[in-house]
Amino acid sequence: MTNKKNHKNETHEIKIEAADQPEAENQPQVDVDALQRQLEDAENKLAESVEGWQRAQADFQNYRKRVERDNELMYVSMKSDIVKKMLPVLDDLERALQNRPADDAWASGIELIARKLQNILDVEGVKRIEAKGLEFDPKFHEAISHEPNDEVESHHVIEVVQNGYMLGERVIRPALVRVAQ
């Protein structure tokens, strides 16, 4: 029985010896400062990458907006070029209608064509510039003469010689007007 008792005590002592050893000896040595520096470096690189990505996203968004704006301007420019080519036809039709004979079937046809052309321009957003009796504005009017006139206030439009038109906010042809002095 003594052997059994000794054996139990030895085992217990071994366990005690292992428990008496410090944990640092059982684990590998770690440099906490080095790990902290590595973590900070990784966080800085991540922040730089995120900032670069955000800048690239913002640049792309700006590029996309610029392309859309340029395409819209090109579309409006092309549209206004086509409308400019149609305006002399409308002017000629309107002049023909001002001097038409009464009860002429051809004149009624010309009037119908002029209305259709004007409707097409209206649908496309082309608006006639109002001028008669209004104050002269060089953004919308082009003066072909300055005349004394007792009936119209100075610097106001006496008569529209040729209608002007706008496409949206853009003047595609200013109104040719006579202006009171």
Image (cartoon, rainbow, N blue to C red):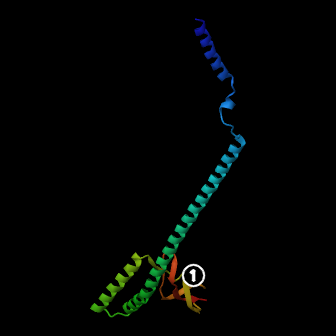
Identified by mark 1, the residue type is Lys
Q: Nearer the viewer, residue 65 or 171?
A: 65
Label count reads: 1
Q: Furthest-right residue in view? A: 33
How far across and how far down the image is residue 119, in percent? 37, 79
Would you say residue 109 is visible in this rendering?
yes
Judging from the image, what secondary structure is the residue with disc 1 in?
loop
Q: Residue furthest left?
A: 105
Residue shown at the point (65%, 19%) measured from the top left: 16
For the C terminus, give its image quadrant: bottom right
Please tell me which residue is depicted at 52% across the width and 71% down the height of the picture: 67
Task: Give the camera-side residue of 51 and 144.
Answer: 51
Q: Residue 100, image x and y in percent?
A: 35, 93
Q: Position of residue 109 (x, y in %)?
A: 30, 88
Q: Residue 91 occupies which quadrant of the picture?
A: bottom left
Q: Position of residue 148 (x, y in %)?
A: 59, 92
Front one among 4 and 172? 4
**Which residue is painted at 54% across and 70% down in the image?**
66
Binning the other alpha carbons within 10 Å of mark 1 as few (below 14), some (14 to 19) or many (20 upward) gives few
> Which residue lies at the image location 58% right of the left edge and 5% below the top edge?
1
Seen in the picture, residue 23 relative to 86 is either above or below; the reply is above
Residue matched to label 1: 139
Residue 104 is at least partly visible in this image: no
